[in-house]
Image (spheres, grey):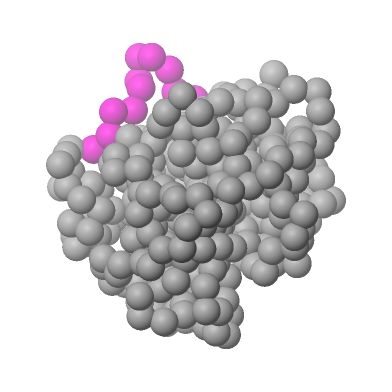
Amino acid sequence: DAGVDYETGPEDEYSGPQEGTCPKVSTPKTIGTVSSSAITEASGLVASKKNPGYFWVHNDSGDSARGFAIAEDGSLKTILAFDDKKPSDIEDMTIDDTGSSSYLYFGDIGDNEAARKSITIHRVLEPTLGDAELVNAVSEKMTVTYEDGPHNAETLMFDPIDKELFIATKILGGPSYIHRLGEFKAGESIVTTKIATVDVDFATGGDISRDGRYIAIRSSISKKGSLWIRDEGQSLAEAFAKDPCVIPLATETQGETLAFLVDNSGYVTISEGEKQSLHLALFQ
């Protein structure tokens, strides 16, 4: 069984903070260690609802187009290969499991020189994990151009309320610009719309909770992340206009991932490097 005891139960199930308040968060703790030597530059991470007890993770630039399903203890379950062509720089992933099918999105969005004319979002139908060590798939692709010219970015997020994709750009010293991609359109080219500017230095990852209420963006150079609380009926732009809460991050060599748990009770992070720890923080 891949499950890990998160020290919560029906009697103390987390229901979230009241509007306008920041949640208390536990000190991040280690729950597992990545076992596969193939996972050396963890750059994106999502929790799977379709495959309870598992996360999907992928490497930074230099790897082929693939993701890894790992258990909460860090053991490797399956490798998912989704394109024959080597990507330029996949920096983050996100997930849409709001419908009858679950989709993984891989963002080929890295651009250290801010010189790429366009970037690519891959969409892959999430497989049901079985005994196969390797699963082959063919990704659908959407080409993306920024409305205001090229950006480097390492954060791709899916909003489960509006069913839209968003990118947070990465700038040393900040800020981070939030760009709306809209709904995924396979085989098409779209132009982003900048919806917000947030005070995040060197944004390297982020996520939106499954209920759409929490938006988190992290940095690899800070031990704290930013968490925006989205009130009912608010757009993402309206949520980003508010001051964020501060949430703790584990001490990691080069942390570029953050994934909310499926039940919205906390989040998990991993650093780049070999045999890295999975760190869990819970809302209290």
The location of residue 15, given as percent across then percent down, is 28, 28
Q: Does the magenta segment cover residue 8?
A: yes
Residue 39 seen in the current view? yes
Q: Is residue 119 left or right of residue 61?
A: left
The quarter of the image holding the C terminus is top left
Q: Residue at x 26, y 67 (%)?
A: 196
The location of residue 59, given as percent across then percent down, is 70, 57
Query: Which residues, given as a range, are shown in magenta?
Result: 7-17
Q: Which residue is drawn at 44% across and 71% down?
A: 145
Q: Does the magenta segment cover residue 86?
A: no
The location of residue 275, given as percent across then percent down, is 77, 51
Q: In this view, does 93 lie to the left or right of 66?
A: left
The quarter of the image holding the N terminus is top right
Which quadrant of the structure image shows residue 98? Answer: top left
Residue 225 seen in the current view? no
Judge by depth and name the residue closer to the eye, 81 or 233: 81
The answer to whether residue 190 is above or below residue 228 is below
Most frequent secondary structure within the magenta stretch: loop
The location of residue 106, given as percent across then percent down, is 58, 53
Which quadrant of the structure image shows residue 192? Answer: bottom left
- Looking at the rendered structure, the number of numbered marks drawn on it comes to 0
Q: In this view, does 168 lie to the left or right of 60?
A: left
Q: Which residue is drawn at 46% across and 80% down?
A: 150
Q: Which residue is drawn at 80% across and 43% down?
A: 35
Residue placed farthest to the top in the image? 10
The answer to whether residue 65 is above or below residue 202 is above
Q: In this view, does 154 lie to the left or right of 254?
A: left
